[in-house]
């Protein structure tokens, strides 16, 4: 905690929401920079180079998705979007445009802070070369080996690919589109049924209760999220 | 569209006049000329009843012209010798005008009556909606105002524990209120037809799993049993909307049955459909009609009931219908209620095989 305070840019037009975000993030030790419009926020992102940006999808001047796109043009900084329940489409667009995660309004501060921590941690972690521990099961993505209850477990190449794609953004949501493009290629970007079938297979192999999964979590209408014992 | 209907009126007018003329020609040798006029008059009446005034007058004028030219002596000319035929012609025009005016008026009145009835129904729904909103929102608002003002104005006099519990109740009530507002908005959007389901292949087990994860806390007092046919095929639905249906059904079960009782979620395949059921072992539907429970604000009669029953099931019905499915309630044989919905199954495209 002694290291330099991480800074967070909050792009949100409602002053009351900015107020409690400022209080909650500040209390957690983050330095908070605020912007009330998308235009201002895009500039602030470039000027202040924050460690993370929180972007509201309902900005008055331009679309939050556009803000995400502009930030992604030059920076890999983690971006979390705030969406209302009626903005399902915009939420998915923002994630596909490069946002790392989302929180649906109204949200509790605990939920937001957890997402912020995960996104910041993920930004510094390097991908690959780690073992995913999921209860009785574990998967080594590097050597492509898996075990359950100490016994070797056979995963197919596609199952490994799917897990690797989810693990690269551990604890963060990965959209259907991202997974499909990554695992099966751009021509299959809309073949959601592939995903449903393979996720079921993976859960049957890795989860204690495949219907109520602890590690391969469904984000309905959006995508999936991989948790492990370290992150769950 | 209206333009076409108008043009069609003139076409029919011309056609009817032609028909009358042919009938008149057939009649001419044996019938009095006045009876032929009657045939034309009939056509004019029909036109005035069925079409707008313009087309009726057009038909009347055409009939008069045809009648005069072909039947009134001297035939083959427009001259009128006999004053009584002039009267016939005047009457025909007058009939066309009077009847089309009467028809138009009664059409206007009907439209006004329908509009009034619709307005009255809208009024009724709006007032029930207001009553329900004010009840469901006022209570949490009162709690939030009271608790937060205590925190804002009396924080020093409160123990840390009291402060925390007040703040928590503000948070809980706010969440609850957000749920209620969402339901009202959702119902309005469904009724306006503003929701198009984004259908895609979904696994019912995932939908069930994600609902259970979200409701874990609210269902913690009940014993939950989940039975999903292991070979249940994928369904092409808007997963978010179907998730909402199941959420509302499970929330209802949790709300209306005693703690410690069983709630059973079952998914079976039957006759080309996937049937999802939420069965409970509570007091059941009592005397309430099993279909009427899906009506908006049904269960609103008694203000002391737990809140929220008003819209949840109506939203379920609207969403399931939007998917072309069916939803219904049943009495369970051992007491308790079952809510079921059926989604039709489609051929799932194959996925690439892998070794």
Image (cartoon, coloured by chain):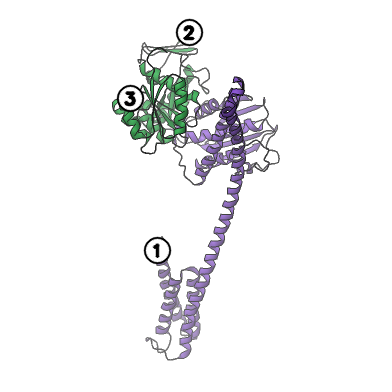
Chain colours: A green, B purple
Q: Reading the chain from its start, which is encountered first: label 3 or label 2?
A: 3
Mark 1 and mark 2 in contact? Answer it, CB < 8 Å.
Answer: no
Which is more toward the observer, B69 or B54? B54
- Secondary structure beneath dot 1 equals helix
For the residue carrying disc 2, how many other residues have a C-alpha within 10 Å: few (<14), some (14-19), or many (20+)?
Answer: few
Residue at 47% of width from left, 21% of height from top? Answer: A27
Q: Quadrant of residue B286?
A: top right
Q: Which residue is mark 2?
A: A150
Q: Position of residue A139 (x, y in %)?
A: 42, 13
Q: Which residue is mark 3?
A: A48
Q: Is residue A101 above or below residue B346?
A: above
Badge 1 and badge 2 both on one subunit: no
| Chain letter belonging to callout 2 | A
Distance between mark 1 and mark 2 Cα atoms: 79 Å
Q: Quadrant of residue B258?
A: top right
Q: On the rendered structure, is B217 left or right of B50?
A: right
Which is more toward the observer, A116 or A203? A116
Position of the N terminus of chain A by quadrant: top left
Q: Which residue is mark 1?
A: B3
Q: On the rendered structure, is B248 left or right of B3?
A: right
């Amino acid at each position: 905690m002694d290291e330099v305070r991480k800074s967070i840019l909050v792009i949100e037009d409602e002053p009351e929401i900015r107020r409690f975000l400022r209080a909650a993030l500040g209390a957690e030790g983050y330095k908070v920079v605020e912007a009330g419009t998308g235009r201002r926020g895009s500039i602030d992102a470039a000027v202040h180079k924050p460690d993370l940006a929180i972007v509201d999808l309902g900005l008055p001047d331009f679309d939050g998705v556009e803000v995400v796109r502009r930030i992604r043009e030059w920076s890999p900084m983690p971006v979390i979007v705030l969406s209302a329940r009626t903005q399902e489409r915009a939420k998915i667009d923002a994630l596909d445009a490069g946002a790392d995660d989302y929180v649906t309004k109204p949200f509790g501060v605990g939920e937001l802070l957890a997402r912020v921590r995960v996104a910041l941690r993920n930004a510094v972690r390097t991908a690959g070369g780690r073992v995913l521990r999921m209860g009785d099961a574990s998967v080594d993505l590097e050597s492509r080996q898996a075990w359950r209850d100490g016994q070797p477990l056979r995963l197919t190449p596609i199952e490994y690919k799917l897990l690797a794609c989810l693990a690269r953004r551990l604890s963060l949501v990965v959209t259907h589109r991202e997974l499909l493009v990554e695992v099966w290629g751009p021509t299959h970007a809309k073949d959601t049924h592939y995903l449903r079938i393979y996720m079921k297979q993976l859960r049957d192999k890795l989860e204690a209760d495949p219907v109520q999964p602890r590690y391969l979590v469904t984000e309905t209408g959006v995508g999936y999220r991989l948790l492990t014992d370290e992150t769950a | 569209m209206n333009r076409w209907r108008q043009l069609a009126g003139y076409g029919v007018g011309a056609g009817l006049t032609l028909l009358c003329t042919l009938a008149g020609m057939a009649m001419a040798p044996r019938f009095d000329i006045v009876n032929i006029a009657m045939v034309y008059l009939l056509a004019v009446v029909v036109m005035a009843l069925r079409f707008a005034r313009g087309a009726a007058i057009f038909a009347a004028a055409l009939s008069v012209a045809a009648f005069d030219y072909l039947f009134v002596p001297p035939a083959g000319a427009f001259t009128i010798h006999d004053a009584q035929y002039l009267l016939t012609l005047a009457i025909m025009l007058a009939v066309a005008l009077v009847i089309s005016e009467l028809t138009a008026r009664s059409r206007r009145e009907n439209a006004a009556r329908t509009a009034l009835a619709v307005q009255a129904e809208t009024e009724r729904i709006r007032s029930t909606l207001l009553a329900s909103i004010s009840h469901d929102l006022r209570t949490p608002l009162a709690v939030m105002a009271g608790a937060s003002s205590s925190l804002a104005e009396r924080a020093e006099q409160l123990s840390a524990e009291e402060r925390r519990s007040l703040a928590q109740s503000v948070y809980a009530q706010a969440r609850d209120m957000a749920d209620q507002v969402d339901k009202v908005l959702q119902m309005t959007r469904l009724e306006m037809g503003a929701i198009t389901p984004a259908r895609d292949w979904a696994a019912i087990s995932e939908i069930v799993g994600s609902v259970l994860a979200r409701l874990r806390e609210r269902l913690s007092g009940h014993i939950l049993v989940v039975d999903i046919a292991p070979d249940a095929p994928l369904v092409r639905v808007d997963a978010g909307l179907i998730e909402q249906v199941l959420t509302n059904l499970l929330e209802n079960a949790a709300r209306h049955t005693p703690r410690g009782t069983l709630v059973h979620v079952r998914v079976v395949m039957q006759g080309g459909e996937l049937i999802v059921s939420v069965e409970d072992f509570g007091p059941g539907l009592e005397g309430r009609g099993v279909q009427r429970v899906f009506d908006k604000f049904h269960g609103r009669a008694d203000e002391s009931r737990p809140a929220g029953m008003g819209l949840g099931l109506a939203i379920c019905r609207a969403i399931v219908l939007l998917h072309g499915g069916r939803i219904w309630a049943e009495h369970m044989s051992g007491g308790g209620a079952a809510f079921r919905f059926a989604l039709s199954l489609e051929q799932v495209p194959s996925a690439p095989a892998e070794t």
